[in-house]
Amino acid sequence: MHLFDQDILLTKEKPSIYKTQISKNWSINGNPNGGYLMAVIAHAMQQESTMASVLICTATYLSKTVPGPADLILENIGRSRNFDRWQAKLVQDGKETLRAMGTFSDTENNRAEKRYETAPPDLAPKDDCIQIPPMGNYTVYENMDVRLDPVCAGWFSGSLIDISEHKGWIKFQNDRPFDQLSLLLAIDAFPPPVFASQGMSAWVPTIEFSVNIRNIPKTRWLKCIFRTRFINTGILEEDGEIWDENGELIAISRQIAQFRKKS
């Protein structure tokens, strides 16, 4: 079993209640990656849903989640012919740390139309990109191969650009294929794009994160682009896209985060 699959395992306690163990293997500066947490909670909702495909997952991060035991408490909030909707809480030591809503569907029955008004990002070849190395408590990069296009990787050496944009490639280090749950991790595995213009000194904790999954990729590597356009009142947005190498749109996301430069 792949490490990611081990780290989203669940034990069902009773109907709509699960236990899990939050892993330290997908951490950013010691904190479990928000996309990984979303994958854990989406996995629980998927177990309960009458429809198999994760269409939309939105999470609100209420307080810090740490590696260790957690309870997942689920509730169905709506069901129709096309969609099954769930709400879930992640609880540690009696305190709710994350609340998520998931919309599930049978997407294979809804592929009649396709129109893309934008194209996949234009990326440098993988071997010319800058691989993010494992860095102490940044364990997600021990398990994910993330490579930044050189045009946006100057912040590693203190060279900044005028736009807050990251683009590049991603895959699992051991080439595990991507599925819906692992896409939730992948779309949150890049550093915040604001680093490209402001440097790594920025403090960018997530407030809310929403992911819309459109397709399962057919290729091992995925092409990603993330952009922040507005920073004000201490808040920024991050809009993301994932494409496969066949030019198929895989997922889109919007993340809302706090922004503060560390003094």
Image: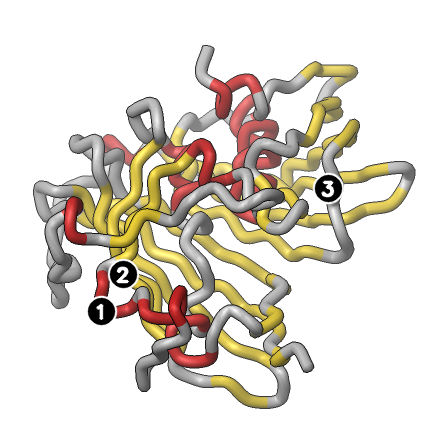
Cα separation between marks 1 and 3: 40 Å
Of helix, strand and loop, which one carries label 3?
A: strand
Q: Amino acid at mark 2?
A: Lys
Quadrant placement of the C terminus: bottom right
For residue 79, say whether it is visible: no
Of helix, strand and loop, which one carries label 1?
A: helix
Of helix, strand and loop, which one carries label 2?
A: strand
Residue furthest to the front in view is 157
Q: Circle 3 sits on which residue?
A: 89
Vertical relation: 103 (above or below) 5:
below
Camera-side residue of 22 and 90: 22
Q: Circle 2 sits on which residue?
A: 167
Q: Amino acid at mark 3?
A: Lys
Vertical relation: 97 (above or below) 51:
below
Vertical relation: 14 (above or below) 138:
above
Q: Residue 27: which quarter of the image?
A: top right
Q: Residue 16: which quarter of the image?
A: top right
Residue at 53% from the left image edge and 36% from the top image edge:
39
Q: Circle 1 sits on which residue?
A: 151
Q: Position of residue 121 (x, y in %)?
A: 16, 61
Cα separation between marks 2 and 3: 32 Å
- Label 1 neighbour load within 10 Å: few <14, some 14-19, many 20+: some
Residue at 39% from the left image edge and 32% from the top image edge:
53
Circles 1 and 2 in contact, beta carbons < 8 Å: yes
Q: Amino acid at mark 1?
A: Val
